[in-house]
Amino acid sequence: MLEWFKCTCPILQSLYAGIFTFLFTVLGASIVLFFKKVNKTVLDSFMAASAGVMLASSFFSLLQPAISISNSLNMKSYIVVSIGFWGGAILVLLFDFAYDFFNKCSESSKKRSTLILLSITAHNIPEGLILGVSFGSLLYNIPGADLTASLLLMVGIALQNFPEGSAVSLPLRREGASRGKAFLLGSLSAIVEPIAAVVGALIVIKIKMILPFLLSLAAGAMVYVVISELIPEFSKNKRKALMNLCTFLGFIIMMILDVAFG
């Protein structure tokens, strides 16, 4: 299976990766079909581990390759990477503003559910772009950018999508939506990820000179998501030591596998 995936073009790899992360959102949303309540510690542990994976990925799989390729292209790496990293944070920040705006403007339960769905869907676009940039950059054989790192990044985003899917479907259910509708809307919140992944891969493949910027952009977006979304959420858990250990575990696993197989 892995050999077949290695022989697939980066665009299809990005598509498959996006579908994989989307399916984890579907899996998380499906909880509403079987459980009235979900153990928050379990979901928070998934979120903490994925935060560690994503933090390690942002450096070892994205920033390091961005620095390497910008140097090879005779660019001032510290300028390109700094601008890209900052740009990624700004990109996700804009989606956060949209999310807050939609919530403030909601006037009814039905309208609020629709707007929350739209805002969370938009929030998933950077994650899809991150996947596409990661897999698309494999075409250039950049030191630090390899299939193992991209696959681990995919797993990290997928783990984060699992509680995200339930975080959409369960509140919708509490607001009175049927189990089927809550599941469907929770699942659709990540349907943009495969599309955004393909777009990210196409941009990287067509314009090599912009690759260092896009890699650092993806890293900035990822770190912002971890800081603004994941850490505040799982930090609310009373078992803080467990959450911290899961975060470190995710980081260490990603770092070891990336360094060992990179």
Image: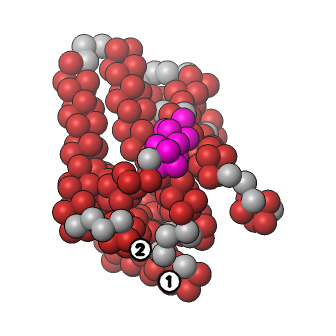
Q: Which residues are magenta?
A: 195-206
Question: Would you name the residue on which mark 2 appears?
Answer: 60
Q: Is residue 8 left or right of residue 137?
A: right
| Residue 200 belongs to magenta span | yes
| Amino acid on which disc 1 is placed | Val
- CA separation in Å, label 1 and label 2: 8 Å
Whether pointer 1 and pointer 2 mark residues with C-beta atoms closer than 8 Å, the reply is yes
| Amino acid on which disc 2 is placed | Phe
Q: Residue at x 35, y 30 (%)?
A: 119
Residue 239 appears at what percent x and percent y? 35, 70
Residue 212 appears at what percent x and percent y? 36, 59
Question: Would you name the residue on which mark 1 appears?
Answer: 259
Residue 34 appears at what percent x and percent y? 63, 40
Q: Which mark is residue 98?
A: none
Decide which of tag 1 and tag 2 comes sooner along the chain: 2
Q: Give the quadrant of the N terminus.
A: bottom right
- Above or below, comparing residue 242 to residue 209 in the picture: below
* Residue 44 appearing in the image: no
Packing grade of label 1 (10 A; few <14, some 14-19, many >=20) is some
Furthest-front residue in this view: 74
Q: Give the quadrant of the C terminus.
A: bottom right
* Residue 60 appearing in the image: yes
- Quick one: 6 or 27, which is closer to the camera? 6
Q: Residue at x 52, y 27 (%)?
A: 185
- Quick one: 71 or 161, which is closer to the camera? 71
Q: Is residue 190 left or right of residue 232?
A: right
